[in-house]
Image: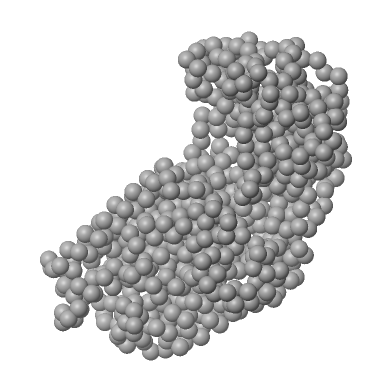
């Protein structure tokens, strides 16, 4: 029998008075320290969240979906135009009904980010209470509260968009604590609050019900039956009521298990038939070396920040096993990392297991001592107290080191194959682009249907008709093969055409589909700053970014690439540009052939500013044709002139700079990832110049006051 199982079965039937759960008293120094730490955590993460929002660093659409859904609740509407379906048919985010009254007063997406941060900070309380109760030491209790707040996966969950399931990290910790100390009412309350977070929460609540059987106490069957019953009820609500009624194929997450079986039942049968393959899949992925690396790093990122203490309480860890299996057996690599929100249901039990794991280690030290690990033992200078405090302090140090290596705020991204998808802090380029983006957002009509790129959706959540532009570009719904109906009533579009998320669903007919959409809605470019483009219904010629036909550049060059495309030349850039200003760069291209253009090939232009010491001071990369008119759509022999507004970052010093261009090519690699390289050319001039072309000299000046 394992140490963890032994300590569970040896729980007393009745709790001693000193073991009764009590709220932390502000008169206790440790409790005050924990509240201060929670305040610091909230202040830091709210600040980062607000900065991310101001500088358009939320580059997925989960925050926007939840904000529009919550706004819709206040109006009695449940269709989510950003997701393109009734949101309850996608995920059972019943928690949003509890948030809606607050959102009705503070109608802004940042409200959700603040709520998420504060709720996650409160999770330190049950960790502190559990550690204080089980370890009998205030210092260790504070250490574990710090471990929770420093846990890298918690920070990543906090900073990656907004998700109702992220809030369950805290509610599950409260539910576990009250289950552990035998408080039935609070256990049920926090279990229900957790179950309202998402349709997969019943997996861990059901496991908590089974776990309660191991806790030797009166009425343990009541806890088990109640938790299992609640889990079954919410599973039925999600999969027998909401999804069948509100999902018509717009959301098909079961396809992520297609490598196990064509349907979920078939996949489950195959997993049951091949248990060894399931175990191997927790650490390895066939011939996909990159995904195998992600899975190995996943275990490192989960256990290293708690100094492996969680492994000393395996039964507590087992509560999260179904959710860990759900993610690691999926084909989506994003689920095999800690940088998204997928750890929300795992984090509570890693921290709880760490507390109980240290308790198990200390109990081994005092085995045979009358009373075992008592408050008296931990109040005096005993080996157990010394070892406990040393391990607790070491764990905090290890957690800090883990944050430096792969943490969310200041991690070095070491041992981290998949770093955070979203930036945590704006670069100089982000700071200079934000005013242009804000100006474009302010130009969007207040009435009518809009289509927005991912980073702009959160600005338009308090309205009914907003489309996620990637659905239009991709042609299907997210995580679905169902065709997305192209709208014909859109009055404006704002999109960042340079982001990977804009092109990751590349299809050979994508450009034609986007152009058809723009023509159907009579949309033309109005403003552009680097890759961000604003299109509106305007008459006549207005701000053309792409021109085809007989176009002759001021400077001829003529260099071919792979026999597919030729760089014809460029127009001289303006001689001066202000810091923070736009530098229009006009280049001319020609498609050479052949008719069977590689379907997955995209050309990428890279503009680089270099100072007198040949140091690169700014770089801007974007796709040739803005993804609207890619090379594979050009007629053979067709010529295209592009205008690209290069924005000079605020940290570029006044002076004279050289402007260079490099052509890159991007296509699918062997592992399915997009691979970029310098475009292949036989031109000797390019070989001598390292693949770059000098476009001219530009003087950067300070703007006049």
Above-or-below relation of 404 to 172: above
Q: State the residue lying farthest toward the left.
A: 381
Determine which quarter of the picture holds residue 386.
Answer: bottom left
Q: Position of residue 193 (x, y in %)?
A: 52, 69
Q: Which residue occupies 68% across, 20% down?
A: 683
Q: Position of residue 607 (x, y in %)?
A: 62, 24
Q: Which residue occupies 49% across, 20% down?
A: 615
Quarter of the picture holding the N terminus = bottom left
Question: Is residue 392 left or right of 93 when viewed as pictured?
Answer: left
Its colouring scheme is: one colour
How many labels sit on residues?
0
Question: Is residue 681 left or right of 703 when viewed as pictured?
Answer: right
Quarter of the picture holding the C terminus = top right
Q: Which residue occupies 44% across, 62% down?
A: 347
Does residue 165 show up?
no
Q: Which residue occupies 69% across, 12% down?
A: 572
Above-or-below relation of 227 to 219: above
Q: Position of residue 498 (x, y in %)?
A: 66, 35
Q: Position of residue 414 (x, y in %)?
A: 42, 45
Above-or-below relation of 544 to 62: above
Question: Is residue 384 left or right of 8 when viewed as pictured?
Answer: left
Determine which quarter of the picture holds residue 331.
Answer: bottom right
Does residue 427 show up?
yes
């Amino acid at each position: 029998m394992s140490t963890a199982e032994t300590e569970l079965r040896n729980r007393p039937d009745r709790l001693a008075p000193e073991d009764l759960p009590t709220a932390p008293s502000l008169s206790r120094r440790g409790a005050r320290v924990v509240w201060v730490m929670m305040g610091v955590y909230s202040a830091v993460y709210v600040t980062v969240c607000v900065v991310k929002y101001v500088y358009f660093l939320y580059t997925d659409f989960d925050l926007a979906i939840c904000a529009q859904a919550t706004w819709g609740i206040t109006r009695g509407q449940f269709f989510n135009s950003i997701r393109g379906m009734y949101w309850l048919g996608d995920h059972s985010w019943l928690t949003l009904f509890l948030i809606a009254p607050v959102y009705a007063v503070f109608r802004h997406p940042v409200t959700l980010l603040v709520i998420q941060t504060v709720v996650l900070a409160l999770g330190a309380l049950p960790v502190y209470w559990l550690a204080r109760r089980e370890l009998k030491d205030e210092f260790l209790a504070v250490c574990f509260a710090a471990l929770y707040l420093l846990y890298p996966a918690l920070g990543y969950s906090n900073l990656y968009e907004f998700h109702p399931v992220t809030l369950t990290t805290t509610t599950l910790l409260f539910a576990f604590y009250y289950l552990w100390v035998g408080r039935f009412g609070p256990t049920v309350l926090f279990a229900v609050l957790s179950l309202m977070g998402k349709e997969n929460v019943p997996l861990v609540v059901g496991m908590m019900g089974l776990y309660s059987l191991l806790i030797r106490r009166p009425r343990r069957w009541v806890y088990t039956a109640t938790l299992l019953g609640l889990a079954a009820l919410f599973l039925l609500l999600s999969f027998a009521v909401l999804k069948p009624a509100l999902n018509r194929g717009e959301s098909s997450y079961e396809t992520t298990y297609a490598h196990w079986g064509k349907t979920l039942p078939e996949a489950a049968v195959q997993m049951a038939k091949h248990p060894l393959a399931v175990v191997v899949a927790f650490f390895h992925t066939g011939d996909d070396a990159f995904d195998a690396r992600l899975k190995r790093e996943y275990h490192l990122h989960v256990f290293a920040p708690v100094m492996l203490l969680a492994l000393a309480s395996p039964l507590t860890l087992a509560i999260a096993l179904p959710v860990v299996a759900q993610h690691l057996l999926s084909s989506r690599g994003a689920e095999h990392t800690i940088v998204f929100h997928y750890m929300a249901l795992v984090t509570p039990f890693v921290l709880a297991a760490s507390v109980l794991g240290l308790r198990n280690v200390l109990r081994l030290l005092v085995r045979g001592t009358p009373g075992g690990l008592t408050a008296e033992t931990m109040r005096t200078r005993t080996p157990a107290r010394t070892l406990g405090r040393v391990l607790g302090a070491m764990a905090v140090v290890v957690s800090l080191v883990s944050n430096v290596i792969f943490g969310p705020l200041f991690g070095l991204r070491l041992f981290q194959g998949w770093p955070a998808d979203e930036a945590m802090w704006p670069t100089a380029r982000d700071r200079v682009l934000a005013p242009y983006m804000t100006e474009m957002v302010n130009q969007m009509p207040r009435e009518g249907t809009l289509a927005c790129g991912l980073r702009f959706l959160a600005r338009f959540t308090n309205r009914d008709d907003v489309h996620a532009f990637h659905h239009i570009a991709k042609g299907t719904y997210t995580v679905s093969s169902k065709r997305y109906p192209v709208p014909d009533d859109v009055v404006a579009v704002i999109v960042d055409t340079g982001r990977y998320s804009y092109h990751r669903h590349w299809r050979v007919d994508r450009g034609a589909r986007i152009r058809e959409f723009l023509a159907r809605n009579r949309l033309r470019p109005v403003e552009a700053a680097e890759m961000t483009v604003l299109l509106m219904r305007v008459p006549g010629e207005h701000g053309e970014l792409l021109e085809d036909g007989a176009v002759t550049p001021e400077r001829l060059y003529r260099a071919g690439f792979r026999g597919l495309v030729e760089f014809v030349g460029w127009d001289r850039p303006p001689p001066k540009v202000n810091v923070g200003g736009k530098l229009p760069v006009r280049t001319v291209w020609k498609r050479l052939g052949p008719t069977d253009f590689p379907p997955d090939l995209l050309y990428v232009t890279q503009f680089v500013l270099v100072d007198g010491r040949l140091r690169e001071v700014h770089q801007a990369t974007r796709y040739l044709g803005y993804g609207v008119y890619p090379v594979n759509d050009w007629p053979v022999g067709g010529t295209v002139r592009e205008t690209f507004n290069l924005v000079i970052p605020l940290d570029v010093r006044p002076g004279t700079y050289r402007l260079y261009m490099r052509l890159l090519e991007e296509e699918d690699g062997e592992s399915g990832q997009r691979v970029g390289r310098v475009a292949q050319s036989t031109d000797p001039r390019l070989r001598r110049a390292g693949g770059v072309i000098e476009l001219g000299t530009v003087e950067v000046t300070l703007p006049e006051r």
